[in-house]
Every structure is written in C-alpha cells, then in structure tokens.
Image (cartoon, helix red, strand yellow):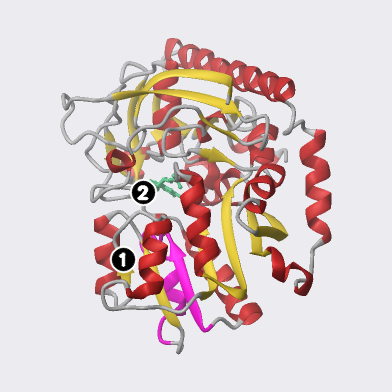
Amino acid sequence: MKKLCNLGKLPLANNLLTNKNDKVKKYPLVVGFDKKTKLVGLMSNAPAEEMFNETYVYDSSQSQTMVNHFKEIAEKSLEKFKPKSVLEIGSNSGIFIKNFKDKDIEVLAVEPCKNFADKTSEEGIDTICAYWDDVLAESILKGYPDYGYPTFDLIFSSNTISHIHDLDSCFKGIKRCLSHGGTFILESPSLLEIIKNNIIDQFYHEHQSYFSIISLNQILIKYGLIIYDVEDIKVHGGSNRYYICHVNNYAQKDVSENLAKLVTKELEYGLDDYKKLKRAFENMLYNLDNLKKQIINLKQDGYNIIGYGATAKISLILNILKLDSKYITYILDTTPEKQNKFIPGIKVKILPYSKLNLNISNVCLLGAWNFKKEILAKEKEYLENGGVFITHIPITSIIDKDTILSK
Ligand code: TMP
C-alpha cells in the first residue's frame, strides 16, 4: 500500500474511559492506497480484541433512523429473496436479524461482542459469539457445536466487513456459506461519499477498508464472487448496499444499471487515482482545520461549546485537533453505556442527553452529523429559541434557525 495520509498516533475512538485517569493506548492511524485493487484502507491495524469485545458501546438501536433502516431492508429481502436461511455477520443489538424471527426461517447471527451476542441469544436468536472468518464458516457448515447449517440463501452484513483485517479469510468464508443462488448483502460507507463530503472522521482504527465498487469487485472476483446490484443509501453519511452473488450464478441475476452509473461517478472523483485521492485528503484536513479555528473563535467570544452525540467520529476529530475540555465542556449522548464516561485522549466527559444539559446558551458541535436530519427535527425547539449547531460536514459551518429556514 502507498501512504495517502498519516493522521498520527491516536486512541481507539470508541474505547471510552470509565475514570478520567485510566491508561490510554494509542495506535498509528495511517491511510493507504493499494494500486492493484484500488482499495483505500488502513496501513496499520490495532488489535481487534481491543476494539470489539464485551465492553463495545456502539448500539445501532439508539437511533430511530437505523431501526427504520434495518426493518426496511429486512422486509425488502424477505419479499425479494424469500430466503429459507439467513446469516448475519456482525449482528450488534439484533436490530436487523430479529425481523426474521418466528417466520419458519433458519436464522443465525455471528457477533464478537459478548454483551450484544448474549442479548440476541436471550431473545431467542441463535448467536455465535465469535469473529467472522473462514475457520468459523467451515465449522458452521460442519455443525458448529450443535447447529450444522446448510448454506445460506441470504447473508447480510452491515458495517462489519469493513472492520475485518483479514479480507482473504472473510470472503473465503462467505463464498463457502452462500447457497448457489443466494445473495450476500454488504452495507458499508461509500468511499465516493467520504471523498465528496469531506468525511475525514470515517477514518478510525475500527474501519480497516473503505470500499468503492471498483475496489470491492476487484477483491471479490478473486473468491468467485461478484457485485450484481448496488444502491446508494443515506446511512452513516452515505453508504453503498452491494448485492453480491457467486460468479457462476451472475447470469441468473438481474444486473442493475446503477452499477455502471455509480462506477462512472467513482471514476470522475478519481477513486482509482492515487494523486486525486491524496489531494482529497489535503482538502479534508484543511476543512478540519477550519473547524478548529471556528471553535477557538467561538470560545474566545465567550460561547460554551458542547458535543452532540459521543460518536467515534467526534472522538477522532477532537483527538486529531487536540481540543480537550478547555474547549468542549461535555458531550451529550442517549446511550446509557456511554454516559458518565470520558472520551479517550482528550478526556471530555459524556453526559446523559437531557433538555437541561442541551441548554440554548450552549453551541453544539454535531458529533452525530450522520443523523443531522433526525437531530435537527428533534431539536426544533432548541433552534427556534436561538440554539446553534456547528458542523464540519460537508464543510465547516454554523446551523441555526436562519440557515435552516433559508434552505
Ligand atoms: P454513530 O454515529 O456511530 O452511529 O453513533 C451515533 C451516536 O449518537 C450514538 O452514541 C447515539 C447518539 N445519538 C444521540 O445521542 N442522540 C440522537 O438523537 C442520535 C440520533 C444519536
């Protein structure tokens, strides 16, 4: 891989501290480009066990947008594929897979974080608490402890494959587990949207790969898999939903025109071109620097600044910009497991979300900018009373009642 950008040595963004003075390990965060496959990915990696374990705090059910998102795709898949068996890789709180319960369908979830795996098991979904790889795939087919599954008609994985370090073992396992006519649906943040919208904060240790259609197809072909359809979806600041099948079943699929259209856009933005990508990173860093300047100016003008959403993204950018509790008084979040903990590195405290903590005299840095629509609708009253947000996506700017009205 050839280096695109070195973001420095940073703490693991989601490893929140219980006590302010807890020890924090830092790992290099370097993004690179693979000339052969055109994949953008991390050149170094932090140990998976330190990021995905029984203390993992990211719970997709905390956002109504995500609940609706997973219900919609589950219903659509049920209708379109009529699967007899479904496997989810990285099932988190069960937000997707629980839509397949009680339907005369074989359902299996794989989730490495024990807190979430226990939750879905207790809810009656067969869940294996493990990291996905080819060894696990083989054991599932052979009869993982007492299961023993046939291959799966539908394999679903949202925001998980991009976290896996060993793509070789990952895709070998998927190939092995997918039934002959089956579909593997992979959702992942879109590199095109990242580049178009300056989303520098998608680049954190948890995310190993940043797929484009171009790179994903290059990689899949090696394992006898191929993309036959793609949808651009809005979640996580712009993602792709890839529909993937066995190469030898491709002729039986309705190949979508969307594929060629989106590949043309990817080429326009230079997602296959090292020099253009390098320039895009320079722009992203410039925009982030503007955010720092704006925050420092607001602080000098006497404003109190808080964060809205203790996301991995806000943890990353505040650490890159070295903005600690001198600048950001606290961060609000609705997730109980995050509350009263501290962001690693810059040690800003996370407080429970409440109207009182939000308070119109505070300027809010939009940490959960990917839920901007949901949040601005929820905080109508705050905005109407003079409340102000600041965001760096797609460009550093202020959001208040006037800017919303002028749209
Ligand atoms: P994510 O960007 O990694 O999906 O995380 C979103 C975080 O933002 C999650 O911790 C929940 C939090 N959040 C709120 O606190 N309030 C909200 O209204 C929304 C939508 C999210």
Occupied quadrant, residue 109: bottom left
Residue 361 in view here:
no
Q: Residues within 10 Å of mark 1 (few under 14, many from 20)?
A: many
Residue 73 in view here:
yes
Circles 1 and 2: CB atoms closer than 8 Å: no
What residue appears at the point 68 percent right and 33 percent down from the top-left corner?
36
Quadrant in the picture for the C terminus:
top right
Question: Where is mark 1, residue-wise?
Answer: 128
Amino acid type assigned to the residue bearing label 1 in the image: Ile
Closest to the observer, 280 or 243? 243
Closest to the observer, 104 or 179? 179
Amino acid type assigned to the residue bearing label 2 in the image: Tyr
Please name which of the two marks, 1 or 2, marks the residue nearer to the observer.
1
Occupied quadrant, residue 223: bottom right
Quick check: 297 above or below 336? above
- Dot label at residue 300: none
Q: Which residues are magenta?
A: 84-102
The spot of residue 259 in percent (x, y) is 78, 54
- Dot label at residue 58: 2
Occupied quadrant, residue 391: top right
Q: Is residue 91 magenta?
A: yes
The spot of residue 291 in percent (x, y) is 54, 20
Give the structural element (helix, strand or loop) at label 1. strand
What residue appears at the point 49 percent right and 27 percent down from the top-left corner?
43
